[in-house]
Amino acid sequence: GKRDNDLILPINSSLSVTLHQDQLKTTTTAAASRDFTEDRLWLNGEEADAGQPRLQTCLREVRRLARKRRGGSAEDAAPLSLSYKIHVATENNFPTAAGLASSAAGYACLVSALARLYGAEGELSEVARRGSGSACRSMLGGFVQWQRGERPDGRDSIAQQVAPETHWPELRVLVLVVSGEKKPVGSTVGMQSSVDTSPLLKHRAEVVVPERVALMARHIRERDFEGFGQLTMRDSNQFHATCLDTFPPIFYLTDVSRRIIALAHRFNAHHGRTKVAYTFDAGPNAVVFTLADTVAEFVEVVRRSFPPATNGDQ
Amino acid sequence: MAAERELAMVTCTAPVNIAVIKYWGKRDNDLILPINSSLSVTLHQDQLKTTTTAAASRDFTEDRLWLNGEEADAGQPRLQTCLREVRRLARKRRGGSAEDTAPLSLSYKIHVATENNFPTAAGLASSAAGYACLVSALARLYGAEGELSEVARRGSGSACRSMLGGFVQWQRGERPDGRDSIAQQVAPETHWPELRVLVLVVSGEKKPVGSTVGMQSSVDTSPLLKHRAEVVVPERVALMVRHIRERDFEGFGQLTMRDSNQFHATCLDTFPPIFYLTDVSRRIITLAHRFNAHHGRTKVAYTFDAGPNAVVFTLADTVAEFVEVVRRSFPPATNGDQFVRGLPVGSASLPEELVVAVVTEPVPGAVRYILHTKPGPGPQLVDDPSQHLLGADGLPRRCA
């Protein structure tokens, strides 16, 4: 949910784990040249609309930061003119059909490339946020908090690192990519509908999340998997609860999602403590957090519970 | 002094009720006091009812209970609580005399037999109808007067709403002793003649988490439930009363759907989460929204309880069309069983544009049958002695 649609300011703070780029990453090349006649954009090799508002907003904001650094001189004395058109190509190292393609990685990459291109400095997470809210969290590694902020201009709605990626060496992430589901309601439309119609979402944002963010930061700092895992599961469920409380209701959890949830609870109950923790976003894939010493066992449990088709794919 | 009767027997029937503002969560487990008020529609006993015969006799040696012909535990606490409370009311009426001078001794053991006119496997068997029936029969048996909905509530919370016909509110109450946590009629069953109810009985699903355990878990673990009970429901109950009194189906329908969804949202916010909505439930929900969107207004409204069956409210002029939409969306297996039961449903041919817009991917067999009913009255006394479920010997008349 947003409290400002133009600036992409959220109704509550959020906290995330940045995943390793060896397994999931977006690569973006940004080029500027006097010879380019128009802005152009290629996504995974296919040309797309470079004029789309959010992309242009990020471009404008990076240029503004670059201009500021250069002293605000009317004439560009720097090597690269801010008025040149740009060409941008971006690719993911994971298939689009997997439903993992995230605008977060995409906009974080775009902003990073443009900033480097123009020599811009400043709060880049704020710029990424203007492209896609959660993109600001992809501007940092490890454990990241996107502060809701209080200012109407959004200058304080930025990402901060809670702990670096080296903080919790035993933490592992299993992304369960589920089989082709119907395309669910998009996030932007969905969250607007929730803000407009769900009384529970309002309460979540105003009362529940502030407490939880503080608690989650503590669990992470203390490497407390029991606390981290439980709170992660609860918050995933509460997010989906507010989707159900939306009108018309939004269903992101599928039958498979529910089976994975029930499986995780049975697994934890069997071991007598929280060893795996699920979380689901606005889509069918499950993300399961666990510690390194549990990975093999849980992967085998998933394999037995959802036997893969013998088609040769790994 | 009048001679004591050897055997007294009373038979009552009681209705099922469907909550449109849901009850989920207790603030007192012993007295069964809810964390929020709830509001329901009492369904007509021609289609759904529980029949209970209660008999008391000097010759009975122990309390006995038969449910649909099978003997069950008569010592279960909630049954005994209702029995004790009805006797207390009877004693009060009789003036609290130490000795019973009335014809029927309150100390006799009782035999109770109860049956539903709908199959148990349908998942409609509701403790609400059961306890309302039990309390009604016992009260008539003992000549007890007073707030019977309070007694029924002690058996099963929502049973208090089955003590009245039409549109019923179960007031949360404020008193710790629960004396003000009772049912009140918002409007009689005759208030809204066009209102209809379609119960979509879905095919055999796994048994979900029971209500008593489920709602306790929700109270213990869901922050959203707390907010719902304290802030959201009070406003909604007042609003729902208004929609009903004004016969405003648009308002009634929307609020009914929202409250069903919010109840299930709090179940999802429970830890571990509780899932009562199934894949079929979700398909019915989206079907309803597509149907309403196609017509440009709220013509059907779903609500789901702690189980897989869907209850759809609509007006009489929409029944035939929506039943046909359900038939096309969930084509019944051709096993000869009647797909549409209860009140008659006319035939409807669907315009092609409606079919294209609304009936997307049919799921054969997902809905076992549809029961068409409407709002109905509260518990009734059965005068005809041939309808007693117990014989003169106090034993069940019909075979299991």
Image (cartoon, coloured by chain):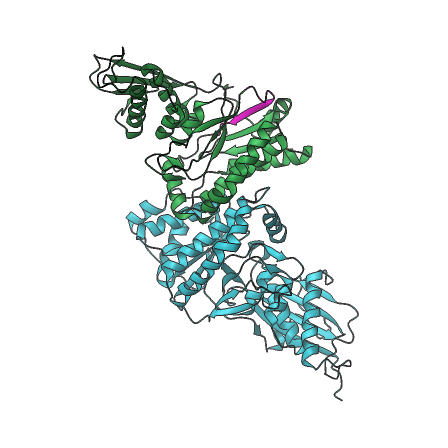
Chain colours: A green, B cyan
Whether A146 is drawn above or below B271: the answer is above
Question: Which residues make up the magenta segment?
Answer: A166-180
Magenta segment: does it hold A154?
Answer: no
Q: Point out residue B203 in the picture as x, y percentages from the top left corner.
A: 52, 48
Whether B118 is drawn above or below A266: the answer is below
Of residues B239 and B73, the one drawn nearer to the viewer in this rendering: B239
Q: Can you name the residue that lies furthest to the top here?
A: A79
A95 sits left or right of B349 in the view: right
Residue A273 in view, yes or no: yes
Magenta segment: does it hold A176?
Answer: yes
Which quarter of the picture shows residue A1?
A: top left
Whether B40 is drawn above or below A39: the answer is below
Q: Point out residue A111 in the picture as x, y percentages from the top left corner.
A: 36, 21
Q: Point out residue B149 in the picture as x, y percentages from the top left corner.
A: 59, 69
Count up the numbered dots. Answer: 0
Which quarter of the picture shows residue B104?
A: bottom right
- Dominant secondary structure of the magenta stretch? loop
Q: Can you name the residue that lies furthest to the bottom here?
A: B1
Residue plotted at (49% across, 31% down):
A15
Residue A99 in view, yes or no: no
Residue plotted at (47% across, 44% down):
A206
B276 sits left or right of B385 in the view: left
Q: Point out residue B219 in the picture as x, y percentages from the top left corner.
A: 59, 50
